[in-house]
Image (spheres, grey):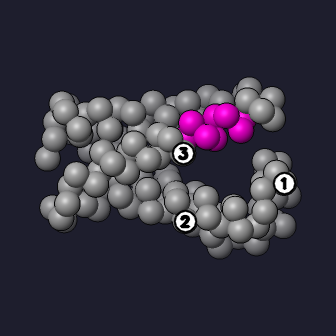
Amino acid sequence: MNIALWIVACVFGLAYVIGGTIKLTMPYERYAAKLHWPEDFTPGNVKFMGLVEVLGGIGLVIPALVDVAPILVPIAASGMALYMAGAITERLRRGEHKELVGDLLFLAAMLFVAWGRFGLEPF
């Protein structure tokens, strides 16, 4: 189970870091032209979401990797689960039901890591 938790944390952590970096570095107009959901948010909101994703992705892996405050891993996973619950709420509000699958996958992965690292396989 420890290996599965590491794999999920690393894969989704990397995905969050990449996605967050794109939100932070790509100009808002270009990003909003590719995806439609940013139209509901200010450029500052989108940049903040990118920052949350980068920090959350780092928090899923680095604390355990360097063995400094590994309790931050399940805390980061819990935070990212809440973040994904917000994303799911936004998808439902916009009627984007097809896109829900990816968000639900990320939510399930974060709940798995939080559950596993808080109790099943803590560091």
Within 10 Å of the Cα at label 1, are there few (<14), some (14-19), or many (20+) other Cα atoms? Answer: some
- Discs 1, 3 touching: Cβ within 8 Å: no
Q: Position of residue 71 (x, y in %)?
A: 22, 51
Residue type at mark 2? Leu
Within 10 Å of the Cα at label 3, are there few (<14), some (14-19), or many (20+) other Cα atoms? Answer: many
Give the quarter of the figure containing the N terminus: top left
User: Which residue bears the numbered disc 1?
Assistant: 39
Q: Position of residue 30 (x, y in %)?
A: 81, 66
Residue type at mark 1? Glu
Q: Is residue 81 left or right of residue 64?
A: right
For residue 83, which numbered disc appears in the image? 3
| Quadrant of the image occupied by residue 6 | top left
- Magenta region, main secondary structure: helix
For residue 51, which numbered disc appears in the image? 2
Viewer-nearest residue: 81 or 17: 81
Element type where label 1 sits in the image: helix
Residue 88 in the magenta stretch? The answer is yes
Please indicate, yes or no, whether residue 13 appears anywhere in the rendered image: yes
Q: Gap in Å between the C-alphas at discs 2 and 1?
A: 18 Å
> For the magenta stretch, what is the residue range?
84-91
Residue type at mark 3? Tyr
Please indicate, yes or no, whether residue 11 appears anywhere in the rendered image: no
Q: Residue at x 72, y 35 (%)?
A: 91
Q: Position of residue 93 (x, y in %)?
A: 77, 33
Residue 102 in the magenta stretch? The answer is no
Viewer-nearest residue: 61 or 78: 78
